[in-house]
Image (spheres, helix red, strand yellow):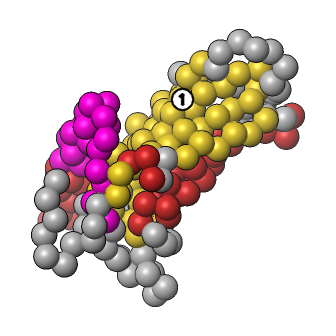
Amino acid sequence: MTETPGELPGKPISASRTTLSHIMTANDTNLLGSVHGGVIMKLVDDAAGAVAGRHSGGPAVTASMDEMAFLAPVRVGDLVHVKAQCNWTGRSSMEIGVRVLAERWNESTPATQVGSAYLVFAAVDAEGKPRQVPPVIPETEQDERRYQEAQIRRTHRLARRQAIMALREERSAQGFDEEF
């Protein structure tokens, strides 16, 4: 990646990569006795927010969560590890990739992946206005693949948003007043 005038110096992915770990308790369960998906989503958002703040060097807010996948249930007594890194950056936005792993707190078996997600954060200043973020610098082949995949997801997000807005305008012009 080359820097353009006025652009902040790039930051390597490893500079903001983080892991958040938490033991799941009975307070975290749903009616089925497994850990509530919302609890996992909050941990995902917390870890992603830490990465976004570290990468951007200041406050960042969640703009969207894409592709939250729950791959296996999490149980009371599981030690959950939420691993997050910045995959891609735009002018003020960042895509953060997150992997969720779980292992029994009292066993020495390897952790297994139980979830994954992609979140988009926007860096903001003290007034809540967008601010510029440093470009992310992929360091490995895997980082480069994630960077390229993030660009594809961004293209799809923008195309989906444009198609939805066009449909809403068309429906409004036809006299449909929809509640949601």
Residue 41, x across and y down, in percent: 59, 43
Asked whether residue 133 is in view, the answer is: yes
Residue extent of the magenta highlight: 134-156
- Residue under the point 43% across and 81% down: 125
Quarter of the picture containing the C terminus is bottom left
Whether residue 38 appears in this view of the structure is no
Residue lying at 46% horizontally and 87% vertically, measured from the top left? 127
Who's the residue at 79% across and 35% down the image? 23
Counting from the top left corner in percent of width and height, residue 89 is at 29, 57
According to the picture, the residue beneath numbered tag 1 turns out to be: 115
Q: Residue at x 13, y 69 (%)?
A: 4
Q: Position of residue 102 (x, y in %)?
A: 66, 25
Left-right relation of 24 to 164: right
Q: Position of residue 119 (x, y in %)?
A: 42, 49
What is the chief secondary structure element of the magenta stretch?
Answer: helix
Classify the position of the N terminus by image quarter: bottom left
